[in-house]
Image (spheres, coloured by chain):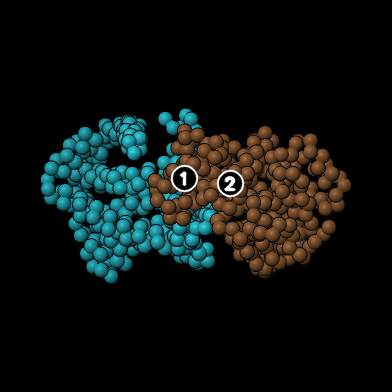
Chain colours: A cyan, B brown
């Protein structure tokens, strides 16, 4: 028990420490941004530092927090519904290959329709409400989650299934201990992709339907030609996404995928 | 010697009886009228050329696939199984892999841990290895884990599906000795699929031979003496006799790579 806790603590520490590499990459991006600012000037591309200070002053305003939470709430509502429906349907389709064959072309069609088209349709169906945003988010992110779940189950190691059956495992036991564990390898990358998609689509739909949120704030900044505030809102949207991704998806994934860490050869681990 | 249609067995109490088994994949017959029985505490080696349906037969006997014809009667309480490709769960460490059958049986976590460690001891796995994941273990260690997994429920019957085929010669011998020793202490019966006559002659009480096309059991040979007590020279001479003088083993090394068992 104590060693398990220590082990977990150690892994957490290692994860935090690996943040330096991420920070280095982001600093590089900021340096490029600064260079762009130096060439094109304040109006086209405000300086990163000015943008950061705008972000900080914006976040001190309770109203801005409320706006961000509104967008995050819409994106997450859509994302969770998409994960639930897409995940369940994907698992079923993964086990029934006939269903998968029927659904695959449908997925291609749904993925091929640009999210902006869904915004237009949802606006006609629901008007300028929360429903429009959530629907668009669901439609945009569900196919990705569905495909990840179906692929995860369909590519499971049937040898392991046979092994479990030889030791007397029933179908539910096999889904629980083998199917779902195997699923995670494909499911989590799909979830990460989908949560990013959910935020992007939510902001876009808000901007188009003028229903407030970060999208609404961006529309406002655009009409004022206020580049600094626009960039600040973009940064806030990204920060919200990063918080969601690293607070909700990565910890679960790290817990389930611990064995992959062990599978990495020396030299890749650190 | 060919006793194709009658059940092949020599002791009275049967741990496993296969009656008139027939199977086909997508209309292609792979097994036809197979009759065999395994007595309690008896290790039977099932040999036959590659692609003759040995694996299919053992999968039918262990309940992984359902036969199209015939019946399978289990005279034992529980069985375990060892596979050629070990089939360990890659996401679970050695201890949890060994305990997997206990988890299926719904046994509590502490009890699982205790029993798994006991089974690990039986196959000389050390505590330090039990925390490792399958990827961190060598081929031989993985096979030890898979044998421990088969032993953990204290079964009275174990199916072996070519378990040592992929191992090198020295390791194969070690694993065979391990198997012979645990069969003697735990007194389980077993059906051991292999195409290595040397292996069959070392570990089994009796060898039965499957036809090249899976068309019935074409014969059997009892091997004198208990497994583990036979000397290397004895085993070697017997295998040479089988291969050169016994018509039953004439096709044992026929290989058709196109056939997938």
Count of marks overlaid on the render: 2
Is residue A72 left or right of B202 when viewed as pictured? left
Looking at the picture, does residue A20 appear above or below residue A163?
Answer: above
First in sequence: mark 1 or mark 2?
A: 1
The secondary element bearing badge 2 is classed as helix
Residue at (47, 44) in percent of width and height? B116
Q: Quadrant of residue B57?
A: bottom right
Residue in front for this viewpoint, A223 or A6 = A6
Identify the residue position indicated by label 1 in the image: B115
Q: Position of residue A263 (x, y in %)?
A: 48, 38
The secondary element bearing badge 1 is classed as helix
Q: Quadrant where the C terminus of chain A lies?
A: top left
Callouts 1 and 2 close, C-beta under 8 Å: no
Label 1 is found on which chain of the structure? B
Label 1 vs label 2, nearer the camera: 2
Residue at (28, 69) in percent of width and height? A124
């Amino acid at each position: 028990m104590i060693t398990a806790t220590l082990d977990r603590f150690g892994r957490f520490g290692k994860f935090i420490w690996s943040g330096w590499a991420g920070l280095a990459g982001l600093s590089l991006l900021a340096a490029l941004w600064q260079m762009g600012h130096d060439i094109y000037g304040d109006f086209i591309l405000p300086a990163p530092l000015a943008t950061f200070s705008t972000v900080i002053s914006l976040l001190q305003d309770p109203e801005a927090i409320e706006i961000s939470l509104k967008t995050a709430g819409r994106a997450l509502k859509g994302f969770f519904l998409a994960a639930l429906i897409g995940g369940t349907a994907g698992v079923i389709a993964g086990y029934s290959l006939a269903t998968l064959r029927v659904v695959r072309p449908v997925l291609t069609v749904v993925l091929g329709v640009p999210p902006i088209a869904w915004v237009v349709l949802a606006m006609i169906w629901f008007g300028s409400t929360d429903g429009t945003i959530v629907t668009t988010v669901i439609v945009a992110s569900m196919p990705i989650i569905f495909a990840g779940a179906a692929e995860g189950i369909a590519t499971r190691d049937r040898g392991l299934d046979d092994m479990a059956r030889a030791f007397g495992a029933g179908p539910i036991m096999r889904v629980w201990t083998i199917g779902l564990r195997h699923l995670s390898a494909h499911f989590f990358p799909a979830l990460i992709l989908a949560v990013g998609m959910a935020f992007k689509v939510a902001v876009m739909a808000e901007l188009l339907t003028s229903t407030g949120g970060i999208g609404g704030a961006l529309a406002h900044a655009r009409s004022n030609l206020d580049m600094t505030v626009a960039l600040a809102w973009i940064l806030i949207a990204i920060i919200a996404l990063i918080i969601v991704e690293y607070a909700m998806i990565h910890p679960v994934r790290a817990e389930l995928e611990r064995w992959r860490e062990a599978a990495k050869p020396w030299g890749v681990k650190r | 010697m060919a006793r194709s249609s009658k059940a092949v067995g020599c002791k009275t109490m049967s741990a496993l009886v296969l009656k008139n088994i027939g199977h086909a994949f997508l209309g292609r017959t792979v097994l036809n009228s197979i009759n065999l029985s395994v007595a309690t505490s008896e290790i039977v080696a099932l040999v036959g050329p590659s692609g003759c349906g040995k694996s299919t037969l053992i999968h039918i006997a262990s309940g992984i696939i359902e036969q199209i014809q015939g019946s399978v009667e289990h005279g034992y309480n529980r069985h375990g199984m060892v596979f050629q490709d070990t089939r360990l769960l890659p996401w679970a460490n050695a201890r949890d892999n060994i305990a997997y059958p206990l988890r299926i049986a719904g046994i509590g976590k502490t009890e699982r841990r205790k029993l798994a460690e006991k089974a690990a001891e039986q196959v000389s796995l050390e505590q330090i290895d039990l925390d490792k994941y399958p990827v961190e273990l060598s081929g031989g260690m993985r096979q030890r884990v898979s044998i421990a997994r088969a032993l953990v429920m204290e079964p009275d019957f174990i199916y072996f599906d070519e378990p040592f085929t992929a191992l090198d010669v020295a390791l194969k011998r070690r694993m065979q000795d391990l198997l012979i020793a645990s069969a003697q202490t735990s007194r389980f019966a077993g059906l051991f699929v292999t195409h290595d006559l040397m292996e069959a002659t070392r570990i089994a009480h009796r060898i039965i031979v499957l036809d090249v096309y899976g068309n019935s059991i074409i014969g059997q040979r009892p091997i004198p003496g208990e497994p583990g007590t036979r000397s290397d020279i004895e085993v070697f001479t017997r295998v040479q006799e089988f291969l050169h003088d016994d018509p039953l083993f004439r096709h044992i090394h026929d290989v058709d790579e196109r056939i997938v068992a």
